[in-house]
Image: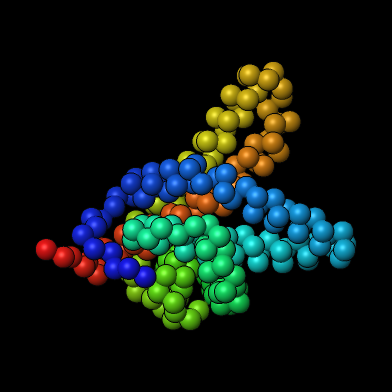
Amino acid sequence: MVEVINKVPMTVGEILGKSIKFAFKNVPWIIPVCFLDYLLVFSLAQLVGNDISNAMSFFLFNSCFFPGMIAAVLGERFCGCNITWYQGVKKSMKKLIPLILLNLAIALMLFAGVLMLLIPGIIVMCATACAVPVMMLEDLRPMEACERSWNLTEKNRFRIFALFCLSLLTILVGTLLSLIVIAKVSGSNPLYMFGFIGLILMPFCQLLGPAINTLLFFDLRIRKEPVTVE
């Protein structure tokens, strides 16, 4: 990956704003992938006939493949490299097994943290926020990516938690406003429109979360490992 040269640190608002802009701009690219994801889930449900297939396909695509693809595309573009979504898909598919192992390790740590009265789980969530971008952009193995993310996020975890809370609030407010506006325009009950809004917002949310983590990774690198050229 190209070095991050002459970049300035970003505020929480700037990270969220850039991530929202990226998500809106690239939703058309992600919709076909989401459609294939939904089609796979439906097909597995029909073939297997239980909820395990749904859970597994959701984990593989939404927790592993999507974040890897988005980290690859946004990360390279942030460094000035012109990478296509097709190239991002290829990069994520090549690392699918390591991504699965990484996310399983994070899930186990989160589960253990939640069992210990929630706060350790929040710490783990913030500490591993950069693990996927690290793996995709620095080509590290799963445990190395976790360790690298843990070190990068040290002394910044309260700020990371604030960023996550702000992004969640943004999604909730956006969903509520969308329901109200569509209900006013169409005259339908907002409850009937909730599923429709969910289908529209799903691709956006699948872009937003990994985009935030990727920009957060760069922000922490800029703060802790600045590289400048005079």
In depth, the one of 66 and 219 nearer the eye is 66
Relative to 111, 222 lies left or right: left
Q: Tell me which corner region of the image, top left, top right, bottom left or bottom right, holds residue 99.
A: bottom right
What's the image's color scheme?
Answer: rainbow
- How many numbered marks have been drawn onto this rendered protein structure? 0
Relative to 182, 116 lies left or right: left
Vertical relation: 162 (above or below) 129: above
Residue sitting farthest toward the left: 230
Relative to 35, 162 lies left or right: left
Looking at the rendered image, the quarter that the C terminus falls into is bottom left
- Residue 220, given in percent of the width and then of the height, sits at 31, 63
Relative to 230, 122 lies left or right: right
Vertical relation: 139 (above or below) 75: below
Q: Which residue corresponds to the image point at 50% horizontal and 50% vertical from the top-left?
A: 208
Looking at the rendered image, the quarter that the N terminus falls into is bottom left
Q: Which residue corresponds to the image point at 73% horizontal and 31% vertical from the top-left?
A: 192
Q: Which residue corresponds to the image point at 46% horizontal and 55% vertical from the top-left?
A: 211
Vertical relation: 149 (above or below) 12: below
- Residue 35, given in percent of the width and then of the height, sits at 69, 50
Residue 102 appears in the figure: yes
Residue 117 appears in the figure: no
In depth, the one of 121 and 203 nearer the eye is 203
Q: Which residue corresponds to the image point at 55% horizontal and 45% vertical from the top-left?
A: 27
- Residue 116, given in percent of the width and then of the height, sits at 53, 70
Q: Tell me which corner region of the image, top left, top right, bottom left or bottom right, holds residue 94.
A: bottom right
Q: Tell me which corner region of the image, top left, top right, bottom left or bottom right, holds residue 49.
A: bottom right
- Residue 41, given in percent of the width and then of the height, sits at 76, 58
In depth, the one of 61 and 1 nearer the eye is 1
